[in-house]
Amino acid sequence: MNIGEAARAAGLPVKTIRYYEEIGL
């Protein structure tokens, strides 16, 4: 699952998903 798919599945903006990845979530 890539960032775009994760964002759509969670209903979150891509920036938020990238932030979560940066903090290691």
Image: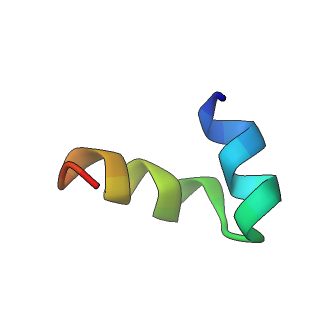
Q: Residue drawn 20% across and 48% down?
A: 24
Tell me how many marks there are.
Answer: 0
Pick the quarter of the image with the N terminus: top right
Residue drawn at x 66%, y 64% as measured from the top left = 13
Color style of the picture: rainbow
Say left or right for 6 vs 15.
right
In the picture, the quarter occupied by the C terminus is: bottom left
Image coordinates for residue 5, horizontal then vertical, percent: 76, 40
Residue 10 drawn above or below residue 21: below
Extreme-bottom residue of the structure: 11
The residue that appears at 35% across and 58% down in the rendered structure is 20
Rendering coords of residue 7 (x, y %): 69, 55
Give the residue furthest to the top: 2
Which residue occupies 61% across, 37% down?
A: 3
